[in-house]
Image: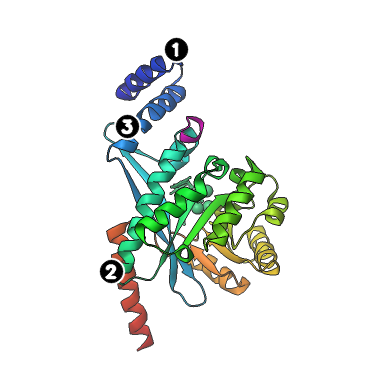
Amino acid sequence: VEIANQCAKREGRRIGLYREGMDERHLRQLAIVGELRNAIEGDQFSLHYQPKVDLRTRRVRHVEALLRWTHPQLGRIGPDEFIPLAERAGLIGALTHWVIDHAFAELAAWRTAGFDHGVAINLSAIDLADPNLASTVLDRLQHHRVTAGDIILEVTESAVLADMERAVQTLKRLRSEGFRVSVDDFGTGQSSLAQLKRLPADELKIDKSFVLQLAPGTDDERIVQSIVQLGHALGIKVVAEGLENEIGLEVLLRLGCDVAQGYHFSRPLPCEALLDWLRRRQEQMEDHAA
Ligand code: C2E
Ligand code: MG
Ligand code: MG
Ligand code: MG
């Protein structure tokens, strides 16, 4: 905490935001913003990957890239904490660039190693409002010689809200190049349905708050059922995130949900651990088939 406070005061003074007597939370936020800049240049970020499992075939079609930050003094800082701060500090563009570059590079390496899964990347509100996003993504695609059809772009509803016109334009452009678009955290935004009407979407991801404790006879079950029906009526694939147990899985199978992701299958894993997990799973599936 002492180190954090020192970082915060230094950064706060530099950008003229520090005031004597600021509370712990604000000091920590200042520290994080200050450290984010160095972290992008330094070697403090990594990507973990979480499998998205096709419930019909049980195959892993994609893995979601989730950003991890370990600061030398502050320790691990979660994306739920630093992503909103990076957005406010104007640093999200640099972070997104880092994520795209690393995820595409790893996708290329998976192909070389004989794996066939694709990757899902999270985009922020600010990214979608950036007129250069599409060309940056296409540039990195060519650079790493990966295929747009193997990549899903996950956008949150609030993200799209920021500048709807620009966001729709960007997503249409990328979609015409073969990328797929996923509406993340569905059911938590302010106007889910209005946005679904305007957004070019291929996938709808049910927010984990409806899935974590999914069980027969609950309101969660009725909500998930309605979202699955809605998605399918629109010709969109439905994904459940935050699947933690077998009971929830049985409900999802019965309701016809297409894909699931969650601790029940695997936590987000560092790249090497993910590949081990996939190899073990492949062996198990072959044993079952035999
Ligand atoms: P998200 O995109 O909705 O990602 C799903 C979150 O749910 C991840 O949290 C994941 O670890 C967590 N999760 C998955 N399965 C389970 C489960 O069974 N139980 C529970 N309790 N949690 C589960 P994480 O990694 O902390 O990321 C949080 C959010 O931060 C993400 O939510 C996304 O909005 C944002 N984020 C993460 N990486 C990036 C990134 O590279 N760029 C941007 N713009 N945002 C990111
Ligand atoms: Mg996501
Ligand atoms: Mg989500
Ligand atoms: Mg989320």
Q: Note whether 171 is above or below 23 in the view shown.
A: below
The disc labelled 2 sits on which kind of residue? Ala
Q: Residues within 10 Å of mark 2 (few under 14, many from 20)?
A: few
Between disc 3 and disc 2, whose residue precedes? 3
Position of 280 compared to 249: left or right? left
Which residue bears the numbered disc 3?
38
Instruction: Name the image quarter holding the N terminus.
Output: top left
Which residue bears the numbered disc 2?
113
Give me the C-alpha separation between circle 3 and circle 2.
33 Å
Q: Is residue 278 visible?
A: yes
Q: Position of residue 273 (x, y in %)?
A: 29, 60
* Residue shown at 49% from the left, 68% from the top: 246
Q: Secondary structure under badge 1? A: loop
Which residue bears the numbered disc 1?
21
Between disc 1 and disc 3, whose residue precedes? 1
Residue span colored magenta = 86-90
